[in-house]
Image (cartoon, rainbow, N blue to C red):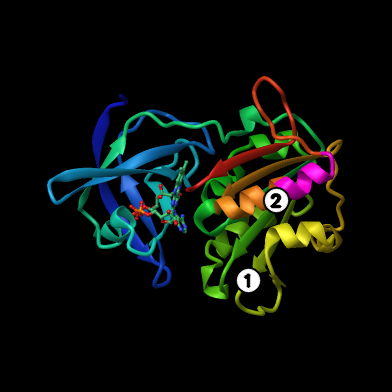
Amino acid sequence: MAEWIQGTVTDNIHWTENLYSLKIDADIDSFVAGQFTSLALEIDGERIARPYSFLSAPGQNPLEFFFYTATGGVLSNAMLELQAGDPIWLKKKANGFFTLSEVPDSRDLWMFGTGTGIAPFFSILKTAEPWERFERVILVHGVRANADLRYQELIENIQRDRPEQLLFKAFVTREEVPGTYHGRIPAAIADGKLEEVCGLELSPENSQIMLCGNPDMVKDTVEILKERGFKKNRRRTPGQVTVENYW
Ligand SMILES: Cc1cc2nc3c(=O)[nH]c(=O)nc-3n(C[C@H](O)[C@H](O)[C@H](O)COP(=O)(O)OP(=O)(O)OC[C@H]3O[C@@H](n4cnc5c(N)ncnc54)[C@H](O)[C@@H]3O)c2cc1C
């Protein structure tokens, strides 16, 4: 069992009714971009813990996490109330294999995240590795509403640094929003819309794909990609599709 340590909340940013970010000062071990840790609070005398992806890059201080308040969700709703100075438990050692070291080389790297499932991609994009290993990086964020499209400034900053390499596309399911596309990510792959708006083809030869967040998006996208010849990426049998399900 990895060791628990106590961190201190330095900021709690409420973006919308359901979305917030915590900044936490804590002396954790170094981690790899794309990994997660566990966060925990004592609730009614019990330590309630859940896994959360780092949004901050390795070495960045304070640590940063991006949350959705799940309906009736015990921990996500409790953490929403935290204020600067409050304590929070974290695992000292990070976990997980949703990292670029697990992703084979290719020309393009596609990152599909729904909701807060975009967090590990920000951590990865803040490091040098994607820019050194891939010609193009395509970040695709699927959300319900325009207000859920957070961290636009961070994306713009990365785009300014990598104008030739980073492409960002947003898909919104419940609203028509100028500058974004209406619908779900799997549907946009199935009908060719995503490739059309990106001006790039998804192919097993040239594309590595990382999927993170809602398990329905992950499952439906994997199924569509399999029909097009993609394979799940596993340590023993490398493929092109690497996944992280949030529930
Ligand atoms: C590897 C990993 C990394 C994760 N990273 C994050 C992260 O960075 N940010 C984050 O918000 N969550 C993340 N999660 C989900 C997180 O661990 C919790 O499940 C979530 O915060 C709900 O906990 P809870 O105690 O509030 O709700 P619970 O009472 O445990 O209810 C869980 C239910 O909430 C829903 N749910 C869970 N997570 C989400 C979500 N992100 N968006 C929408 N609905 C959700 C599902 O329907 C799930 O059945 C991650 C999960 C995994 C496995």
Horizontally, residue 232 falls left or right of residue 153, namely right
Q: Check disc 1 and report its element: helix, strand or loop.
A: loop
Q: Is residue 242 left or right of residue 84?
A: right
Q: Is residue 189 visible?
A: yes
Specify start and end residues of the magenta stretch as a single range.
Answer: 223-229
Indicate the position of residue 163 as horizontal and vertical percent values: 75, 54
Image location of residue 58, percent across then percent down: 48, 36
Q: What amino acid type should be assigned to the residue bearing mark 1?
A: Thr
Residue with the most extreme left position:
45
Residue 99: quadrant of the picture: top right
Q: Give the mark nearest the N terminus, 2 or 1.
A: 1
Q: Is residue 125 magenta?
A: no
Q: Which residue is mark 2?
A: 221
Task: Please give left or right for residue 222 compared with residue 35 in the image.
Answer: right
Q: CA distance from mark 2 to mark 1?
A: 16 Å
Quarter occupied by the N terminus: top left
For residue 173, which numbered disc appears in the image?
1
Q: Position of residue 83 (x, y in %)?
A: 24, 60
- In the displayed structure, would residue 25 be above or below residue 237? below
Contact between labelled residues 1 and 2, with CB atoms less than 8 Å apart: no
Give the class, few, some or many, for how many residues have Cα within 10 Å of label 1's Cα (few <14, many ≥20): some
Residue toward you, 137 or 182: 182
